[in-house]
Amino acid sequence: MIKSPLIQKPLPGPKALKLIDQDRIYVSPSYTRYYPLVVEKAKGLWVNDVDGNIFLDFTAGIAVCATGHCHPRVVKAVKEQADRLLHMSGTDFYYRAQIALAKKLSSITPGEGGKKVYFGNSGAEAVEAAFKLARWHTKRELNLAFYGAFHGRTMGALSLTASKTIQKKHYNPLVPGITHIPYAYCYRCPYNLQYPECELGCVQWIEDTLFRTTIPPEEVAAIIVEPIQGEGGYIVPPPEFHKKLNSLAKKYGILYVTDEVQSGMGRTGKMFAMEHFDVDPDIIALAKGIASGMPLGALIAGTEIMNWEAGSHASTFGGNPVSCQAALVTIELLEEELMKNAADQGDYLMAGLRELQQSYECMGDVRGKGLMVGVELVKDRETKEPARTWRDEIIQNAFYKGLLLLGCGENTIRFSPPLTVTAGEIDTCLSIFDNVVKEIAG
Ligand code: PLP
């Protein structure tokens, strides 16, 4: 039997309304809430709110719950570890779970040779650590990052971010020495070129213009890049983009740092999105899906690169034993079945969305890999005028019909369900999405 969302009107219900009122009084107003969902519990892809409404979750808690909400094996591992040891700090002491996870991550990340792992608590911390390690290792001061990139909100990570000005407003001055360059966003090429005739002029421009006029390449520590841009709009660059960029980096002794916080941990149908592009990065930042919802960030680098000395970087809570144990089971589940499921169901989802695209002019671009799928909404296919309001209304209305979605970029809807998603759940999602798009922009 295919399960469906169960929604009683009015939404939000009375209990949700009360809690939202309290939230307004006590919780920071800096959070962005798309719709009034107040969660009580969740299992797999199904989320219950405090009033008994049941939603189908195609957000995975912002691409985090890779193994579905509260996977029994993850919950068991968390409970068992909580009984043994909650915290000791991997900064000053040793414990089994952190060492075991470091060993596992070293073996599954791309690249030959020995690797070492640094642990933090979040994506921003993983990126922050990457930023510092690149400076420490190379003793160079400059960095390149991309327009559209989102790397987190701590001051270093925020300095690398170039997604929305609201994220930076009133926080200047940020960390100096970062130059943002256009990403390979072929649907809206920043250089007005056409792929493949462009021969990736966007990468060539870095060498021909940037490195000749303003940025001495021998002073650049790292190029920091998302394999597929996440918050920027689920933008998949052309197949050769990373190879060409990495070759340029290698030519000048620049480290290639990939932020796989959103794209990693099986989401794209491979353990790491960079595997689709056949590049072994020098440094990899991970978080989000790594521990199925327990807070954890990790930075993986070759042993010769992660050569900073004792005391140069650390965090009290980083590599918490409960989170590490959850990560070990998460990786087991990804390897056993979920990565493959992400590839298979991702194809199914993409095919379904492409079919809907035939009927709706507003679905300008459907793109993605595995279960990292975006639909860019436009007013007109020819002019590609961004349809931001439609995007927001579609997300709102989907919520009122029991489907949880999130936006990304200016006018894109992201589909990032848990990797446990079934074909039946995708059918339900597509049917609700179809109805909502018809109502708003059909
Ligand atoms: N990097 C990428 C690619 C992300 O998508 C995010 C969060 O969305 C981050 C870094 C920051 O992660 P966190 O919110 O855990 O600090």
Image (cartoon, rainbow, N blue to C red):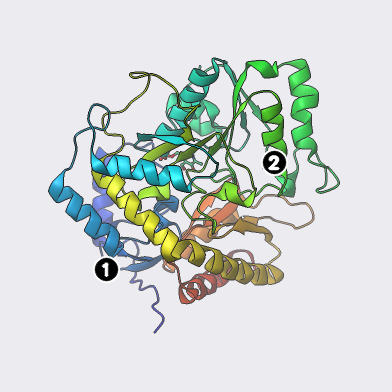
Q: Which mark is residue 340?
A: none
Looking at the image, the residue that sits furthest to the left is: 83
User: In this rendering, does residue 46 appear at all?
Assistant: yes
Nearest to viewer (mark 1 / mark 2): 2
What whole-number distance in Å separates the C-alpha atoms at marks 1 and 2?
Answer: 49 Å
Q: Determine which quarter of the picture holds residue 162.
A: top right
Check the picture and name the quadrant holding the C terminus: bottom right
Q: Determine which quarter of the picture holds residue 119.
A: top left
Residue occupied by mark 1? 52
Q: Residues within 10 Å of mark 1 (few under 14, many from 20)?
A: some
Check the picture and name the quadrant holding the N terminus: bottom left
Looking at the image, the residue that sits furthest to the right is: 197
Expressed as whole percent of the image width and height from the top left, the position of residue 209 reads 79, 23
Residue plotted at (31% across, 28% down): 315
In the image shown, does 376 or 435 lie closer to the viewer? Answer: 376
Q: Amino acid at mark 1?
A: Gly
User: In this rendering, does residue 293 appear at all?
Assistant: no
Residue occupied by mark 2? 243
From the viewer's perspective, is residue 96 above or below residue 142? below
